[in-house]
Image (cartoon, grey):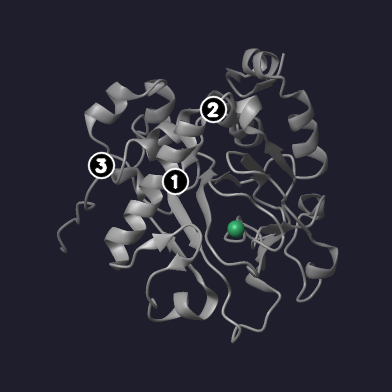
Amino acid sequence: MIVNNSIDISEIVAEYGLTDHLIELDEVGLTVVSQETLRLSDEWIDRLRDALLRVGEARTGVSFNLATGPSANIEGRPSQTGQMIFSHLVHEDQAFIDVLTHPVKKALMTYMLGDGHRLAVSDGWIKWQTPDAWENEVTTGFHTDQSMVPAPWHWRVPHIANMNWTLTDYTRDDGALAYVPGSHREGRLPEPDEALPRAIPVEAPRGSLVMFNGALWHGAYRKKTPGLRLTMLGQHCRPYMLPFQDFKGRIPNESFEHSEDPEYLRSLMREDETQLRVGPMPVPPIA
Ligand SMILES: [Fe+2]
C-alpha cells in the first residue's frame, strides 16, 4: 500500500502502471508520463493547447502560429528572451481546471506532496525561437521551485512540486526543460555555473506529463527552431504554505460540478481550508 498521509494512491498506481515513475521521482527527481499511459486523446491535448493560444492572443493582441511563432513583436522582456508566461489560467477555460484532476497527476503529486496539497500557480508558457541577441545557452536560468524556503531541504518531503504538460514536442533544440538528474537529493540551490554542465533535456513528445520535485535544479534551453513550444504548468505546494496565486473563493460552482473529481479540486483550491480568511483581515481599533 502506498500511503502519503491519508490518501492511498495504490489503486491508481496499479491501474495505470506507475511504479517505475515513483522510483524515478525518488532517484532522478523528475519523471515523464506518456500520453498513452495517461490514456488521453489527441483532442484532449488539442483542447488545452488551443485554450492556451486563445489566452495568449487575447492578452497580447498578437496571434501565435504553431509553425512560425508570434505574428508581431511583443515589447519588453518577451522580445528579448522569446517567451511569455500567462498566469491564472483556471479562470480562462474549463480545460485548465480539468487538467488538474487527472488521476495520474493526482497520484504523483500526492506521492511527492502528501494529502491536502494546494495549487500554487496555474500558468501557460508560450516560447518561440530565441532571438540571436540573447547570448545564453539557457533562456530560463537554473533554479529550484522551492527556493523561497531556505535550504537545506529533505528530498523526500519537498515543499513544492511541479507538473508540466507538453502541448508541443519537446527536444533540446526546441527549447526543452533542462534539468540535473538527482540534484533534488543535494537539498540545496546550485552554485552559479554548476548546473548547466550536468544538465540534460527533457525529450518528450506532445501530450506528455512531466512531474518533478521542487528541489530539482532545472531551467530551459534556448529555442533554436522556428515555431512554438507550448506548456501548461502548475506548481503545487504543501498545505502549510500559501499558494502564489489565490484561487480560494474565486472558482465558480459550475467548475466544481463539471469536475470528474470535485473533492480533490476543492482541496487544490483551498476551499476546505479553515485557518485563513478570505478578504481583508479585520483591523482592531487603536486604543
Ligand atoms: Fe521552475
For ligand 1, give the image quadrant: bottom right
User: Residue at the location (64% across, 63% down)?
Assistant: 175
Which quadrant holds residue 207?
Answer: top right
The residue under label 3 is which amino acid type? Arg
Q: Is mark 2 on a helix, strand or loop?
A: loop
The residue singled out by tag 3 in the image is 250
* Dot label at residue 252: none
Of label 3 and label 1, which has the lower sequence position?
1
The residue singled out by tag 1 in the image is 49
Of label 3 and label 2, which has the lower sequence position?
2
Mark 3 or 2: in front is 2
Query: Do callouts 3 and 2 mark residues in contact (Cβ within 8 Å)?
Result: no
Q: Is mark 1 on a helix, strand or loop?
A: helix
Residue closer to the observer: 41 or 265: 41
Cα–Cα gap, marks 3 and 1: 23 Å
Residue 238 percent location from the top left of the image: 54, 41
Residue 10 percent location from the top left of the image: 67, 15
Is residue 90 rendered to the left or right of residue 44? left
The residue singled out by tag 2 in the image is 40
Of label 1 and label 2, which has the lower sequence position?
2
Q: In this view, does 253 lie above or below 214?
A: above
The residue under label 2 is which amino acid type? Leu
Which quadrant holds residue 71?
Answer: bottom left
The residue under label 1 is which amino acid type? Arg
Q: Categorize mark 2 by other alpha carbons within 10 Å: few (<14), some (14-19), many (20+).
A: some
Residue 94 percent location from the top left of the image: 33, 36
Is residue 43 rendered to the left or right of residue 272? right
